[in-house]
C-alpha cells in the first residue's frame, strides 16, 4: 500500500517508520498513536525530503514539545551565527526549529539547516517571498506566493505557518472592532497589507486547495497561523481572534479531507484567567487539532524578562491542552536574540513544558522529579547535576560558592535540614 502523508498512512492502517519511532520515544501503543494521527489529534511533521529528521509527535497524550525560532533580519544578517544557534538548539533538546529569516536570499541557509537538523524544521513562506522575488509586497502575485510554498516544501521543510485565516471577512471584523495593538503577527500584517493594497482576497485562503496539493505531495504539516493573535492582554479573546479561529477550524476540516496534517497556532498575550478557556475553545472549534502557542505572555510590562512571562503562560496553556510551545527569549520585543538569549528561552520553555506534563499525567514525567528528589535527599551532587535541566548552570553555581561541609551548600552549611535529618535518622550526631 502506498501513501503520501502520515495521516493518509494512518487512515489506511499503515504503520510508518516515523510512527514506530514516535511510539518508542513516547511509550505509547502504536495502534493508539496511528488512530490519533488518522483523526488529526496528533501530527508527525516529516517532509519526505528531510532525510536527517528524527521524527517527533505533537498532540494528544504526548509530551509537550518546544520550538526554537531563529533566522536573519536586515539589521542582523549573519547566517553563521544563526547556524550556531541551530546547533545549540539541537544540543539543548529543542523538538523543532523555525527559520524566520526575512531578508535576502535565504535558500542556501534553509537547505543547510534542513540537511543538518534532526529536529523538525518550520518556516513562514510569506516572510521569504519579498526577498525571493525581489519585488514590492503589493506586486507579488498569488501564484508567486504559492511558488515560495512549493520551494520550501521541495527543500524539505516539515511544517509551515500559513496565515490563511485572515481572509477579507476577518479583516473586516478587525477594522470594525479596533484593537489597542492592531495586528502584531508579521505574516498577518503582510497579508492584511497585501489585501488592502490589491483589494483582493488572501491568496492562501482563496487558493487553499492548491496549497493542500503541495503539502500533500511532500507531507508538509500546515501550521495554520494566528494572524490575529493578541499583541496585548487587552486584545485577547476579542472578535477578530475568534473570527479567525472559526475560519481555521473550517480550513482544518478541508485539509483533513486531503489527508494533510494540521496544527493550529494561538496566542499571544493573554491574562492568566483567559488561558484555560482559550485552550478549550481552540480544541472545540478546531476539532481537536494540536495547538501551538507563543507563550502566552501573561503580562505586557516585562521587556527583558518575557521568557518568564511566556513560561508562566506556557505552563498553564499546556496543562490545559496546548501541545506545542514556541519559546520566548529575554530579547522578545527588543532585538534579535543572541545565543545566550536563545539558551535562556529554551530552558524556560522546557521547564514550562515539563511542568505541564506533570499536571497532564504524561507517563514518566514525575519519574524525573522523583529521581532528583532522591538525589537531593542523598546529597548526591553528581546525580543532581546529571538530572538538572541545565547541568552547566547547576555545576557553575555550586563551584562558585564552596561550603565548609561537603555534604551541604553555602545557604545553610551545617544547619542543612537534609543533612541533619539524614544524621538524626541514622542515629549520628548532627554537629
Image: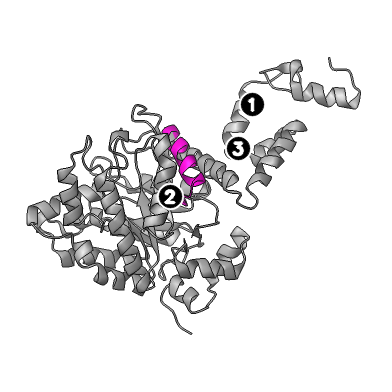
Q: Is residue 302 magenta?
A: no
* Secondary element at image label 3: helix
- Separation of marks 1 and 2 at Cα, in angstroms: 46 Å
For the residues bearing labels 1 and 2, Cβ distance under 8 angstroms: no
In this rendering, is residue 123 above or below 387? below
For the residues bearing labels 3 and 1, Cβ distance under 8 angstroms: no
- Separation of marks 3 and 1 at Cα, in angstroms: 12 Å
Percent coordinates x, y for residue 357 in the rendering: 57, 47
Q: Main secondary structure of the magenta part?
A: helix
Percent coordinates x, y for residue 113 in the rendering: 39, 57
In this rendering, is residue 44 above or below 193? below
If you read the primary sequence from the N terminus, does the residue marked by circle 3 or circle 1 appear first?
A: 3
Magenta stretch?
Answer: 308-325
Percent coordinates x, y for residue 211 in the rendering: 27, 68
- For label 2, the crowd category at 10 Å Cα-Cα, with few meaning under 14, some 14 to 19 and many 20 or more, is some
Q: Is residue 321 magenta?
A: yes
Q: Is residue 52 left or right of residue 128?
A: right
Percent coordinates x, y for residue 180 in the rendering: 22, 34
Q: Is residue 282 left or right of residue 318?
A: left
Q: Is residue 365 left or right of residue 255?
A: right
Residue at 52% of width from left, 70% of height from top?
35
Amino acid at each position: 500500500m502506498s501513501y503520501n502523508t502520515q495521516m493518509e498512512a494512518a487512515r489506511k492502517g499503515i504503520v510508518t517508520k516515523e510512527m514506530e519511532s514516535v511510539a518508542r520515544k513516547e511509550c505509547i501503543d502504536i495502534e493508539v498513536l496511528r488512530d490519533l494521527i488518522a483523526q488529526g489529534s496528533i501530527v508527525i511533521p516529516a517532509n519526505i525530503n528531510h532525510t536527517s529528521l528524527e521524527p517527533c509527535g505533537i498532540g494528544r497524550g504526548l509530551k509537550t514539545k518546544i520550538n526554537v525560532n531563529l533566522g536573519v533580519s536586515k539589521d542582523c544578517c549573519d547566517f553563521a551565527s544563526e547556524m550556531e544557534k541551530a546547533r545549540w538548539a539541537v544540543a539543548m533538546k529543542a523538538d523543532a526549529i523555525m527559520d524566520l529569516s526575512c531578508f535576502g536570499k535565504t535558500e542556501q541557509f534553509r537547505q543547510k539547516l534542513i540537511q543538518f537538523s534532526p529536529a523538525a524544521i518550520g518556516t513562514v513562506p510569506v516572510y521569504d517571498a519579498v526577498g525571493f522575488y525581489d519585488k514590492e509586497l503589493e506586486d507579488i502575485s498569488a501564484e508567486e506566493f504559492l511558488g515560495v510554498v512549493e520551494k520550501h516544501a521541495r527543500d524539505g521543510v516539515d511544517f509551515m505557518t500559513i496565515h490563511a485565516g485572515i481572509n477579507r471577512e476577518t479583516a473586516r471584523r478587525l477594522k470594525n472592532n479596533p484593537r489597542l495593538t492592531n495586528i502584531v503577527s508579521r505574516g498577518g500584517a503582510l497579508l492584511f497589507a497585501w489585501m488592502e493594497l490589491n483589494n483582493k482576497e488572501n491568496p492562501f485562503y482563496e487558493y487553499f486547495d492548491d496549497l493542500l496539493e503541495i503539502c500533500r505531495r511532500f507531507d508538509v504539516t500546515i501550521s495554520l497561523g494566528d494572524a490575529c493573535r493578541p499583541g496585548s492582554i487587552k486584545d485577547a479573546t476579542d472578535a477578530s481572534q475568534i473570527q479567525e479561529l472559526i475560519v481555521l477550524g473550517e480550513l482544518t476540516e478541508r485539509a483533513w479531507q486531503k489527508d494533510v496534517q494540521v496544527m493550529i497556532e494561538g496566542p499571544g498575550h493573554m491574562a492568566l484567567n483567559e488561558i484555560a478557556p482559550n485552550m478549550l475553545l481552540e480544541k472545540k472549534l478546531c476539532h481537536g487539532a494540536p495547538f501551538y502557542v507563543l507563550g502566552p505572555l501573561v503580562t505586557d510590562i516585562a521587556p527583558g524578562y518575557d521568557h518568564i512571562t511566556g513560561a508562566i503562560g506556557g505552563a498553564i496553556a499546556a496543562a490545559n491542552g496546548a501541545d506545542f510551545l514556541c519559546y520566548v527569549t529575554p530579547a522578545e520585543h527588543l532585538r534579535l536574540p543572541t545565543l545566550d538569549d536563545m539558551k535562556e528561552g529554551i530552558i524556560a520553555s522546557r521547564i514550562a513544558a515539563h511542568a505541564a506534563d506533570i499536571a497532564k499525567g504524561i507517563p514518566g514525567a514525575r519519574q524525573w522529579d522523583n529521581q532528583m528528589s532522591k538525589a537531593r535527599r542523598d546529597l548526591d551532587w553528581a546525580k543532581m547535576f546529571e538530572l538538572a535541566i541545565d547541568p552547566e548552570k547547576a555545576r557553575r553555581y555550586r563551584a562558585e560558592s564552596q561550603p565548609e561541609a561537603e555534604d551541604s551548600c553555602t545557604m545553610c552549611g551545617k544547619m542543612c535540614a537534609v543533612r541533619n535529618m539524614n544524621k538524626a535518622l541514622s542515629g549520628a550526631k548532627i554537629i
